[in-house]
Amino acid sequence: MESRPKVTPLTRPSARRSHVPPLGVHPTPDGGVDVAVAASHADGVELCLIDVVEPHRDPHDPARYAERRVPLDGPVYGVWHGHVPHVRPGQRYGFRTYGPWDPEAGQRHNPAKLLVDPYARGLAGDLSYGPETRGSAERYGAPDDRDSLAFVPHSVVVPSHPGPPPLSRPRVPWADTVVYEAHVRGLTAQHPDVPPELRGTYAGVAHPATIAHLTSLGVTTLELLPIHAFVSEPRLAEQGLTNYWGYQTLGFFTPHAAYATRAAREAGPAAVLDEVRGMVHLLHEAGIEVLLDVVYNHTCEGGDDALHVSWRGLDNAGYYLHDGASPAALADVTGTGNSLDFRRPRVVQLALDSLRYWAEVVGVDGFRFDLAVTLGRTHHGFSPDHPFLVALQTDPVLNNLKLVAEPWDVGPGGWQTGNFPPPMAEWNDRFRDAVRGFWLDAPREGSHGRAMHGLRELTTRLAGSADLFGRSDPPLIRGPVASVNYVTAHDGFTLADLVAYDHKHNEANGEENCDGSDHNLSWNHGVEGHAPDGAEGGGDDTATEPWSAVVPLRRRSQRNLLAMLLLSAGTPMLTAGDELGRSQGGNNNAYAQDNAISWVSWDLDDAARDLLDTTRFLLGLRHEHAALRADSFFLGTPRPGEDEPDLLWFDAEGAAMDHERWEEAGRRVVQMLRPGPDDGDVAVLLVLNGGLDDAAVTLPTAPGGGTWERVWSSAWDRPEPPDDDAEDVVLESLSVEVFLGG
């Protein structure tokens, strides 16, 4: 391996410190910076200060830059450190490491490669995908000696204290929470009421027009797809595509600059950070919480022979999970080529430090952890008692935030829904599959004369999934709010596409339609794809065949799915654009589509406006009636001091569901009665007909002997005035009705 060149240091500590400064590069009051970086297997580390000396040159021209190298002291417990005077905010920098190049042992130190600081608060420049940004040409080959300085983003020193934090958090109770999953760019890229210069930016998310839409829906909590700095995969770059979703992190402390306004980008990383903080501040003023989708399970560096831009060059064996074999190979439990090794204290520290930074400095209200099982993996598999998960429960900065796990990864034992510890909530994929299965997959099977199933699974999910989230010590302490219910998310079909496609159509992703899930539980209602322009007509009487029959059924199916999502016990998560009928043309894995395929369209026709009104109405019902916002699991029996059970089930004849009725094959009609929890709260009755024929239903007696008022039916294109004194009703096929009483 190349020996260290003789470099005259700008400064070196006069004595070994008894402690080291915090990891990263932090300005100090004397006009310098404290520097610390973890590289436990390196023989030496240099801080590289970079200046743009010929700005007219191409950004990837090495002659554009001048570099000053400062050897760091150490290591102290694997950390190299120093204090460098006369370095101020805005300074570009990186690291170079010296040490063994032994890929078969997992060691990949290569001083020709400038490395991004894992703790960088800002980044400048773009990544090039040429050989300069790879450590070697082959997996176990010799190191590549081409210098990468001009081909990688540069870390940037950012002021340590950017000002006071945003307003006090809204702290919406879990029982009142309605999550809206959105993409910073996609949410406003086409919004006509957002000024063009703000569309697709952090500022656009916080624009009054955007906030007005969220508040009119009843959204309390905005969950943003990743905004940590990220890059695209080399394959996408070669095909002229980009990573749109952002699950390829390059900087866990750095906001993704491409989502900032042009003015902020030109002003530099500190201005980008200010725009993000301003977005959070304005959303808080509107009473809306902000959750960030965070990706601590892997990085952008890919497999062994891929990018060499940060962690791989600093401490490949210390950061990444390896298989323990010889020659060493990465253990990929994320499906991305690498996995961060949460058995290592420095990896746990990196994630916790990043979370605290976004909570304390930026002011966000919580996090959704991508592939969270990876974060809880020990030497023996997933453990809910993993140190990282214990830290989330006990850390005074983090344990009062909203913490949501995606409870799976692709490794052994990777499905762990229901097994994360409180206070964490979890995405409930069983809810998604139960709702799709009952309302789409089963009717599709029934339309071909096959048996229709799924009632018991659906009703378990409607009641809060106690079978999954009630397992705790003591039992039931998590409550149904631990179940983040969803029917769609960023990955998979949109709501409109679920009812229009039996098969995925991902050709635009450049993988010959081999990417994306084939387990969609969708139903095209007889015809694949959406109706051509004009074929739907202004109403059923002007629509053309076969759309005159198909389109109304599809719209009703969307309303059925929305009713299940928004009226079930648990925490509902709505995907941006589903309330407007957004389609991705059948693409169920649009991770590489930074274009109109993925962006929310605000050009609404009558059907889209009807769907929007329906979504607002259903969320309004949820907000107005405590019976729809259960904070604790139903017991099915009277609670102490109460006379009536807190949840009752009835069949179509109004008789209480017993064991025999639950076991009856093919049952497709059920009534769910949820009494009001307190005096003065009305009861809510949900009546479901999942059959292919209309069903006569006798409603049960309303609590207190009152009457039922029908307030909504999925057979209605839009919400209509309530129907008083309902007793015996006929539900149309594949429909839901909601009654209030008591």
Image (tube, helix red, strand yellow):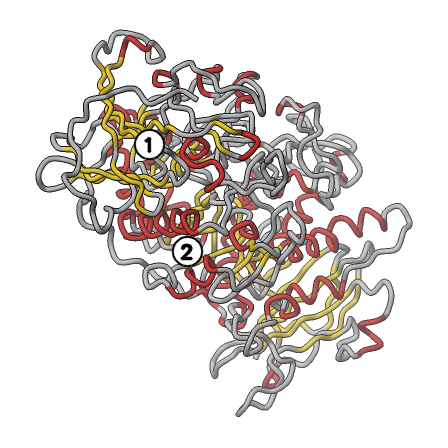
| x, y percent for residue 673 | 64, 74
The numbered disc on residue 44 is: 1
Q: Is residue 510 above or below residue 60?
A: below
- Of the residues tagged 1 and 2, which is closer to the observer? 1
Q: Is residue 174 left or right of residue 114?
A: right
Dot 2 alpha-carbon crowd within 10 angstroms: few under 14, some 14 to 19, many 20 or more: many
Quadrant location of the C terminus? Answer: bottom right
Q: What's the distance in space between the residues labelled 1 and 2, CA to CA?
A: 50 Å
- SS class of the residue under badge 2? loop
Q: Is residue 435 above or below residue 129?
A: below
Report the residue at 37% width, 31% height from top: 259
Report the residue at 47% width, 45% height from top: 296
Q: Is residue 715 left or right of residue 594?
A: right
Report the residue at 61% width, 42% height from top: 323
Quadrant location of the N terminus? Answer: top left
Residue type at mark 2: give it.
Answer: Thr
Q: Earlier in the sequence, mark 1 or mark 2?
A: 1
| x, y percent for residue 529 | 71, 31
Report the residue at 60% width, 72% height from top: 470
Q: Is residue 320 left or right of residue 725?
A: left
Do the residues bearing badges 1 and 2 touch, measured as CB atoms within 8 Å? Answer: no
Q: Is residue 91 left or right of residue 250?
A: left
Q: Is residue 398 above or below residue 277?
A: below
| x, y percent for residue 143 | 48, 20
Residue type at mark 1: give it.
Answer: Gly
The numbered disc on residue 581 is: none
| x, y percent for residue 192 | 40, 31
- SS class of the residue under badge 1? strand
Dot 1 alpha-carbon crowd within 10 angstroms: few under 14, some 14 to 19, many 20 or more: many
The numbered disc on residue 220 is: 2
Q: Is residue 305 above or below residue 476?
A: above
